Amino acid sequence: MIEKLACRLGRNDEIPNIELAELLCRNNDAAGIEEIVGGFKGKDTPVANDCIKVLYEIGDRKPELICAYANDFLSGLRSGNNRLVWGSMTALAKIAELAPDAIFEKIEDVISAYQNGSVITVDNSISVFAGLCKAGGECAETALPILLKHLKECRPKEVPQHAERASSCFNRDNADQFIQVLEGRRPHLSAPQQRKVDKLLKTLNQM
């Protein structure tokens, strides 16, 4: 499968990697996915970069095919290669609801990447925290305060998008807390941003 990667084909676009992800999904190709994970963990940077793209594209289509590799993605958060860091967080965002326990065991790595990572890393970490929050129990006890604090403090332009990412974990028990935070941010948002937040507030108020 490695030979089908964009870098091995001399391509500078992502189309071969997306096509490979689609092929692996169509065939439920566990052995092929294992090979791609090996490339992701290897020392060949172009291969690793393409492999993480393939993996999170699989996660977008059939997350169950990559959820067994949660620990590999968590290790990727500690990479010195930013492409692998945000790619790993993207992959974790796809599987957070399927593998919350594995992710929660290394929650400090997620928090560290969230605090120090790029915009894309932060964006996807919100989805990871939402997945943990949705899992309930100790996962939710840790993730919910992080989400609420983030929505209170993030830049206004990020509020609608990140609130939408968090919305997967909205429920009756936490609705009031999200309502309080979003209503507090609403006056500081532009009209289009307010409209997006209003849709979420409507959902929350109906819980």
Image (cartoon, rainbow, N blue to C red):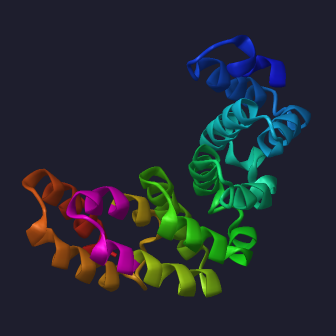
x 65%, y 18%: residue: 16
Coordinates of residue 14 in the picture (x, y in percent): 58, 23
Highlighted range, magenta? 148-163
Coordinates of residue 59 in the picture (x, y in percent): 65, 44
Magenta-span inclusion, residue 154: yes
Q: Say above or below: 116 vs 192.
A: below
Coordinates of residue 82 in the picture (x, y in percent): 58, 49
| Image quadrant where residue 65 sits | top right
Q: Main secondary structure of the magenta part?
A: helix
Coordinates of residue 80 in the picture (x, y in percent): 66, 53
Q: Say above or below: 159 vs 5.
A: below
Magenta-span inclusion, residue 143: no
x 48%, y 70%: residue: 115
Query: Can residue 131 be seen from the camera position used here?
Result: no
Q: Is residue 86 left or right of residue 104?
A: left
**Who is closer to the viewer here, 76 or 144?**
76
The quarter in which the C terminus is drawn is bottom left
Q: Is residue 182 left or right of residue 70?
A: left
The quarter in which the N terminus is drawn is top right
Q: Is residue 68 left or right of residue 117?
A: right
**Who is closer to the viewer here, 89 or 65?**
89
